[in-house]
Amino acid sequence: MPRVGLFIPCYMDQLYPQVAMATLELLERLGCDVHFPSAQTCCGQPMANTGCTDDARPLAEKFLSIFSEYEYVVCPSGSCTAMVTHHYEELLHGRVGYEQLRKKTFELCEFLVDVLKVTKIEGSFPYKVGLHNSCHGLRELRLGSSSEMMVTRFNKAGQLLAGLEGIELVTLQRPDECCGFGGTFAVAEEAVSCMMGLDRIHDHEQAGADVMTAGDMSCLMHLYGLITRQKKPIQVMHVAEILAGRQPQMKKDS
């Protein structure tokens, strides 16, 4: 039974605890011994992204001290996972234990596919679903194949979702385009961020999606804000919620 330290992003802990609970339930259902270390805090990504390295370093050090004891560290967020596996090197260079931590830290779908070797999750989700690929998950973690790469197409979240009964993964025109959130970018460049988000929503709408899903709740938070303000019927759900058996708060069209 894999002993897993569950790493929940700070914004998810505060705003979307249902995603954290879905992640916990899913991992336990698949046979993991899951622990949530209550001392965990922000991974430091917001500070690092804005160049405040000295402010981010103590958070990286705290993360290392908290999660080093677990066999695996699993996080339902591509961007926060990428912070640990790709960007802590600058903050923790040469620190004892970091290389081991980096190698055992995984995004949720990455962990299910690559470590647990899950090929199918039992469940039903009879809706048309558009899968948004977050930039960090796609470009840094390689959770899917980018459109410009001449490789066999793959998508780890899509692979897991496709096994659910009744689901229809719709075809997007631009499947790996940024949603425009980008953390502080959405504040500094509000107009550009909103236009990018509206473009992503339109792509899912033209494909006929009932539900937009992603492995990063930060992307979905940005998109949901735009959807709500424009009173659009499309729903948003994190991949973990769908795989854990949650259903959208809507009626399926007859």
Image: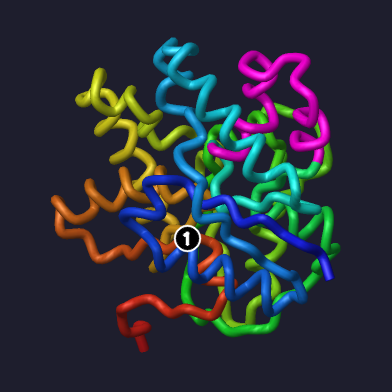
Q: Which residues are magenta?
A: 80-103
Q: Position of residue 34 (x, y in %)?
A: 67, 66
Q: Position of residue 175 (x, y in %)?
A: 55, 43
Residue 92 lies in the magenta stretch: yes
The answer to whether residue 128 is above or below residue 107 is below
Inspect the image, locate mark 1, and give the three-letter code of the amino acid beneath it.
His
Write the residue at 24% across / 25% down.
187
Q: Quadrant of residue 167?
A: bottom right
Task: Find numbered disc 1 in the image and state the secondary structure of the residue it sits on.
Answer: strand
Write the residue at 36% across / 55% down.
205
Q: Position of residue 253 (x, y in %)?
A: 35, 83
Task: Report which residue position mark 1 lands on.
Answer: 238
Q: Quadrant of residue 80?
A: top right
**How many numbered badges does the structure rendering display?**
1
Q: Position of residue 93 (x, y in %)?
A: 72, 15
Looking at the rendering, in which quadrant would you find the C terminus? bottom left
The answer to whether residue 74 is above or below residue 35 is above
Along the line of sight, the residue nearer the viewer: 208 or 106:
106
Looking at the rendering, in which quadrant would you find the N terminus? bottom right
The answer to whether residue 10 is above or below residue 53 is below
Residue 250 lies in the magenta stretch: no
Question: In the image, 154: left or right of 198?
Answer: right
Q: How many residues crowd around disc 1 within 10 Å: few (fewer than 14), some, or many (20 or more)?
A: many
Write the residue at 61% across / 39% down.
81
Colour scheme: rainbow
Q: Could you tell me what secondary structure mostly forms the magenta stretch?
A: helix
Write the residue at 63% across / 43% down.
66
Question: In the image, 30: left or right of 17?
Answer: right
| Residue farthest along the bottom direction in this orientation | 254
Along the line of sight, the residue nearer the viewer: 144 or 252:
144
